[in-house]
Image (cartoon, helix red, strand yellow):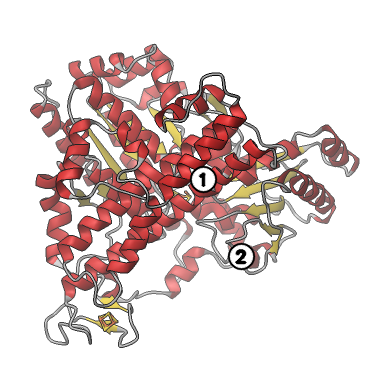
Amino acid sequence: MKHPFSENTITEDGRLMLRKMEKDQVETVWERFSAQQPQCGFCEMGLSCRVCNMGPCRVDPFGEGPQQGVCGADADIIVARNLGRMIAAGAAAHSDHGRDLVEVLAAVAEGHAPGYAVNDEPKLRRVAAEYDVATQDRSAAEIAADLARAMQEDYGTRRKALTLLARAPRKRRERWAQLGITPRGIDRETSEMMHRTHMGVDNGWQSLLLHGLRNALSDGWGGSMIATEVSDILFGTPRVTPNSVNVGVLKADQVNIVVHGHNPVVSEMLLQACQSPELTELALARGAQGINLVGLCCTGNELLMRHGIPMAGNHLMTELVIASGAVEMMLADYQCIMPSLGAVAACYHTRMISTSDKARFPGMTHREFHPDNARELARTLVAEAIENFSRRGEVYIPVAPVPSLGGFSVETIIEALGGSPDPLIAALKTGQIRGAVGVVGCNNPKIRHDFGHVTLTRRLIENDILVVDTGCAAIANAKAGFKVAEAIRYAGPGLREVCGALGIPPVLHMGSCVDNVRILVLAAALADALGVDISDLPIAGAAPEWYSEKAVSIGAYFVASGVTTVLGPMPPITGSINVVKLLTEGLADLLGATFAVEPDPEKAAILIRRHIENRRAKLGLPAVQV
Ligand code: SF4
Ligand code: MSK
């Protein structure tokens, strides 16, 4: 059964593009989602296991059928093992992305990466100092080589604790040590999770979950943090930059090139190529008015944060953008790229290119990027996109783009505050700003597209709670118009006054999925300034429309870092009441933070406000009326 358009998405561009796809008879994620109904109840509850070939097995949640798998694993073990493997997959994805950047940094140091360079040398020196790499009287290349090596060691097993854990407040690190969850090598924790969840290894559901937290911390304070820091070093630390969002960023009279995926290694080279005068001339010679590079998902967020490159949409918009008929070429690296995209593109003139050695897709031409060939390959592909302009059929770009501000790195936020977090702390103390929430994560057809993000964010800011966002949530909130200075009109009086005085919106775009670590660093800075732990702060996390394993890892490292986190869609854990109770209650004693699940964003907003009120009371700050 087809969903009516108005039920699928709250966005105007989404609704109009869905109507176009219906007319063109092109299938979307929502039709495939419908075709999957009802989804498997055992899997939804986390009660099915296919870890070994004595199975697959399942446990009957009603107690009538089998209560154990063939090996004897019960519901608690099976649910914890499944969740552990989700965290491992998410942590692996983020961390492998980070490793790719470290390899580019090493190649830059060796002079084997034409087109790439160290763009933020002060940051290179700062991060190098954290790694005990000598910086005095040394060139950027020398420092970069040593830093890349030191970071590569963080991936291995040599260290007792990851280097960047030193950024976490001391009290937090002590908790991790007491619980035995201090992450060691980044790859080691993921590898150990796969080992523990092999048949016949760790069959303690509590120890499995604790290792899940350790594995997630190896992502948050390891792989993802390295990805963000090295991206800043190579491509520049984001500064506040205007941009625009939605399908309207496509231009009817220009060659449109879309980058999709996560890794800025490819998209940055595309940007350089699109700015080249020769290729612009070629575009003009072929009858276009120029070359228009736009982003999708998180590689788009990377370009938006650093260069103000416009953003065509988030996860559930990726098929719809192609139906505009205006996309000459889409380049995909990895993560969150639906394997359906090639089939959608086949209905239009769009050329689909996969670019990573580790990610292939049906219906895409594979053209592999490496540091040594990236600059040249990017130019070749842009030229091919230009040649594709003449093959265009009907073009449909039914909306105007929405203006937005991006680029709120921690450095920029502190700068906007006048050089220290003190004004933010003062506003928290008086209650002008009652707290801060990271609204992050994906879209999921289980939730009306963007409804969760936008509704929750609206309620939070009108209650004087500052929102920082990343990933697909950040794109949803930008499309809703929350990211211009005038958006303070949506904010409560206190937040409006503070943001108005600083000239910033009430919702700050902090970047891509790996950039969630910027939120950790900001939280650590606030905790240090107040002399407390992160879990004492009036802050929370929320992932109202999450879908990916990466989001599970992010949620787990947020909670393990002391940030209570509210999920929209229920994770597959309800088959074990023990697991549910530990994650939603038991972790409070161990970590000072828990998970909560609330698919209704109105109710999630109330839950978060209560949590913030509770933390404020514990800190002795004035109360918020809830
Ligand atoms: Fe079944 Fe146990 Fe094998 Fe899982 S590990 S598939 S529960 S026998
Ligand atoms: S792209 S992980 S759908 S945020 Fe980072 Fe969006 Fe989620 Fe992918």
Q: Which mark is residue 360?
A: 2
Depth order, front residue of 321/85: 85
Q: Quadrant of the C terminus?
A: top left
Residue 84 seen in the figure:
yes
Depth order, front residue of 119/505: 119
The x and y percentages for residue 14 are 52, 51
* Residue visible at 31% across and 43% down in the picture: 161
Q: Which residue is mark 1?
A: 298
* Residue visible at 32% across and 32% down in the picture: 167
Q: Secondary structure at mark 2?
A: loop
Give the side of residue 406 with respect to residue 278, left or right.
left
**Is residue 313 shown above or below 320?**
above
Instruction: Identify which amino acid the numbered label 2 is placed on.
Output: Arg
Is the C-beta of the residue carrying label 1 under 8 Å from the nearest atom of ligand 2? yes
Q: Tell me which label, 2 or 1, sits earlier in the chain.
A: 1
- The residue carrying pointer 1 sits among few (fewer than 14), some (14 to 19) or many (20 or more) residues within 10 Å by Cα, namely many
**Is residue 272 shown above or below 321?**
above
* Image depth: mark 2 or mark 1 in front: 2
The x and y percentages for residue 245 are 56, 38
The x and y percentages for residue 567 are 28, 51
Depth order, front residue of 615/446: 615
Distance, label 2 to label 1, CA atoms, is 18 Å
* Residue visible at 55% across and 44% down in the picture: 101
| Picture quadrant where residue 493 is located | top left
Q: Quadrant of the N terminus?
A: bottom left
Depth order, front residue of 2/29: 29
Residue 447 seen in the figure:
no
Q: Secondary structure at mark 1?
A: helix
| Picture quadrant where residue 163 is located | top left
Instruction: Identify which amino acid the numbered label 1 is placed on.
Output: Cys
* Residue visible at 73% across and 48% down in the picture: 373
Q: How many marks?
A: 2
